[in-house]
Amino acid sequence: MMPWSAILMILFIGNLLFFCGPSQRESKSELQTKGYELKSQFPIREISVRGRVVKNKEKNLYHLEFEPNSIHLIQLHKPSKIQLKLPYVNAQTFVVNLHYKNDSFTSNFTFPEGWIDSSQLEAVFYTKQSFGYKIPLNTIYSPFGKYQSVYRVVDGKAIRLNVEVIGIKENQALVVGDLMLGDILVISRLGELVDGMSVKVNL
């Protein structure tokens, strides 16, 4: 006959396996989060970037250098022209032609007066084939950093996706990126996420 101590030990181990079984392990690996569904979009006609004016060795010849975010936007839309906003009163529109080769582009131009008194200028280009999305600011990982991204839910997993923030107003951000209507973005616990992590999203 089995002693009572052995029976109690078996019951104890059985209860332990029951409470620490597969269902609990699965819940630990699946992060509970809140989500935001993209329900509207708007056409982007003007995109603003900032460029640094750099003088070439040749007389009156300049070129533009852009920050990584601006370079990504330009390469994404590939505008043939970009318009500089000169820091002068009643300044005329000044357009710079962009020339592309493989994954890079050049922007050499001459300036009529032969000089520019500002090293940083705002520039804009126009597109009719792009859409932007207004999303809560807290859906963006590092919204004020160099590189911004969101986590899009695909087949129960949080997939990190780079976006470009083109404007921020109050708690909303205007972004462009590889998004589409109906996408679900993670809106909470972004700091705990890893690309490809399983998530359970509550809308």
Image: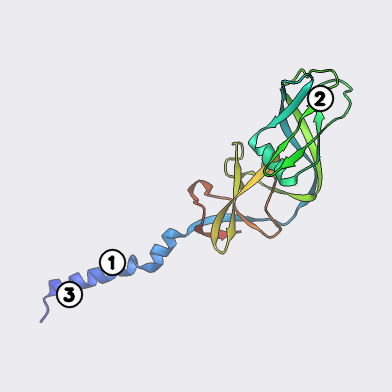
Side (left or right) of 24 relative to 146: left
| Residue 16, label in figure | 1
Amino acid at pointer 1 = Leu
What kind of colouring is applied to the model shown? Answer: rainbow
Nearest the viewer among 142 and 34 is 142
Asked where in the image residue 5 lies, by quadrant, the reply is bottom left
Q: Which tag, 1 or 2, sits closer to the chain's start?
A: 1
Pointer 3 with pointer 1, Cβ within 8 A = no
Residue that badge 2 annotates: 110
Where does residue 132 sit, x and y in percent of width and height?
74, 48
Amino acid at pointer 3 = Ile
Where does residue 178 sit, x and y in percent of width and height?
67, 53
| Residue 7, label in figure | 3
- Mark 2 element type: strand
Q: Which tag, 3 or 2, sits closer to the chain's start?
A: 3
Where does residue 179 sit, x and y in percent of width and height?
68, 54
CA separation in Å, label 3 and label 1:
14 Å
